[in-house]
Amino acid sequence: MSQPSSLLRTRGQHDSGKVTMVELFFDLVFVYAVTQLSHSLLAKLTMAGAVEIFALLLAVWWVWIYTSWATNWLDPERIPVRMSLFVLMFAGLLMSVSIPAAFAERGLLFAAAYVFMQVGRTLFFLWAVRSGSRNMIRNFQRILAWLLLSAAFWIAGGLTDGNTRLLCWAAALFIEFISPAMLFWVPGLGRSSTADWDVDGNHMAERCALFVIIALGESLLVTGATFADQSWNFDVITAFVIAVVGTVALWWIYFDSGAQRAHHRIIHSDDPGQQARVAYTYIHTLIIASIIVCAVADELVLAHPDHASNAGISALLGGPALYVLGCALFKWVTSGRRMPPLSHLVGLGLLTTLLPFAYAHVFSALVLSALTTSVLVAVWESHSVRHSAS
């Protein structure tokens, strides 16, 4: 692993786990992907539409987080690794372009681009570490086997349409999401162990935090663009202020100290692979999904502050609730506490109490947005972590 020809990062140096510029460049494709997801959800704000967009979100997140795992080991400053990221960027752009019509005429393009990224990256990794650790090679051989199995369902779904496509892609996502929990067990190859996933905790924590920033940035872009297109009056200006405060509250809940504590914990963990799998791979799915839903809710309120449909109410309540839940789980598993932060549990309770009033249309969209934002402010991390010992 220390040979000059190795494409692996050199561990132990002060900057060995830093996020490189080419990784940030790679992330630009996913800025576009998140925008496509939020716009598609807004255009299909029904139960069926939400299920479809959630499936696409899972795919986008999964291909990004798997790439982040790969570059945790591989050195993006080496030319072969850098070129592989550029190829993945191109495929990711095709995948992102196809998102709005992924359940229509561009399903096969989405599936093919996704499979190419997942399988192609894994094959490249196996080539890159061909003379490296046997455990690492075996680990990625098992991953490849699972990805090839799911690939059959992705392509089958792309060749069909309607509910059949959704079922095929749901099966593919189930295969991919359950595989890390099963430690990628493959007959004849056995299973991996979290000890095999000797990730650099500094890199993993920073990469996931940057994706949260991407999602929050997209939320601000949506808010600004929608506000600029409206006729400005008291309600619209108030909705704009509430949306910005809400986004700041989302940032604060995640970043004020919880992210730093989780960062410190994974760096000093005896089993960083376990932390990376649960806290950063699985739980962050909820956090990213909720930010997208919150962005859609903000756009709805800016466009129609007087009234919200039941679907809009679901977004106004569901986005904050899902975010608080995701952050509560994230802080719980990375803090060693017996229970999630109390303020987060209280926040979830307050959001739940709003349900009957919201669906009875007691509140306008603007008032409901103000109430949910107030709940987010109430669970700011300075209250939930710094001033709480339990």
Image: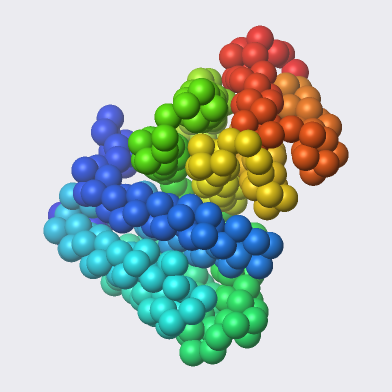
Where's residue 38, x and y in %? 48, 52
Give the quarter of the figure containing the N terminus: bottom left
Query: Would you place residue 94 above or below residue 50 in this image?
Result: below
| 193 with respect to 361 (left or right) | left
Residue 320: which quarter of the image?
top right
| 164 with respect to 273 (left or right) | right
Any part of residue 107 in sight: yes
Residue 308: which quarter of the image?
top right
Query: Would you place residue 108 above or below residue 314 in this image?
Result: below
At a point 50% along the width and 30% down the height, the residue shown is: 236
Where's residue 117, x and y in %? 36, 70
Query: Would you place residue 111 above or below residue 310 in this image?
Result: below
Residue 163: which quarter of the image?
bottom right
At a point 44% along the width and 46% down the height, the residue shown is: 199
Where's residue 128, x and y in %? 27, 66
Residues 12 and 163: in front is 163
- The colour scheme applied to this rendered structure is rainbow
Any part of residue 244 in sight: no
Where's residue 255, x and y in %? 49, 26
Q: How many marks?
A: 0
Residues 3 and 47: in front is 47
